[in-house]
Image: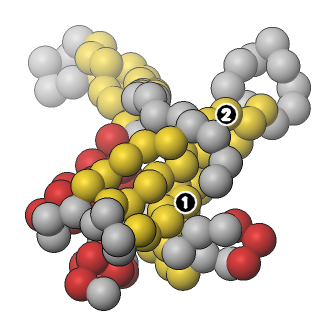
Amino acid sequence: MEVREALLALNVPEAPFQVRHGFPKEKADLVADRHVPQLDLTVKIRMRLVPATREVRALEEQWGRISHEYSGRQYGRGGGVMVARKWRFEKGPDGRRHLVETFRFDSRDMKDPLRDTVLAAGWTWRGVLLKW
């Protein structure tokens, strides 16, 4: 299928995520994985291809330490935008302190290329919340 090959073609060294074939227990045709060690966060998008309706059903999941108040890893599911940044002060050329961004995470960096690839192939991207 052309959409499957197009999604697998997103596996390039500079991509922040990997697209692979799903394992039987994941109940998905393709899975996109990303681990963000700075946040102790794992993001997974499970995709099921439905050729009859030319749609990709996508279930977004994340595991991580979302809150400093809770010491364990938490599970979440569903579409949404997560953005995280880390900053530090550095001395600039003018001798003054400036804030410099040292880390940036945006969940759209993973979801947008997947969704855009599906739409460019003429298929529909449908986010789901419940297990299929």
User: Within the image, what quadrant is residue 16 found in?
Assistant: bottom left
Residue on which disc 2 sits: 76
> What amino acid is labelled 1 in the image?
Arg
- Looking at the image, which is closer to me, 127 or 91? 127
Q: Is residue 57 shown left or right of residue 55?
A: right
Q: Badge 2, how many Cα within 10 Å: few under 14, some, many 20+?
A: few
Q: Badge 1, how many Cα within 10 Å: few under 14, some, many 20+?
A: many
Residue on which disc 1 sits: 46
Say whether marks 1 and 2 touch (CB < 8 Å).
no
Residue at 41 percent of width and 29 percent of height: 81
- Work out whether 74 lies above or below 91: below
Q: Is residue 67 shown left or right of residue 71?
A: left
- Work out whether 94 lies above or below 42: above
> What amino acid is labelled 2 in the image?
Gly
- Looking at the image, which is closer to me, 132 or 34? 132
- Report how far apart the C-alphas of labels 1 and 2 lie in the structure: 14 Å
Q: In the image as oriented, which residue stretches furthest toward the right?
A: 71
The reply to whether residue 39 is visible in this rendering is: no
User: Where in the figure is residue 91, as x and y percent of width and height?
Assistant: 29, 23
- Work out whether 122 lies above or below 81: below
User: Where in the figure is residue 42, as x and y percent of width and height?
Assistant: 63, 50
- Looking at the image, which is closer to me, 126 or 22? 126
Residue at 50 percent of width and 73 percent of height: 30
Residue at 23 percent of width and 12 percent of height: 96
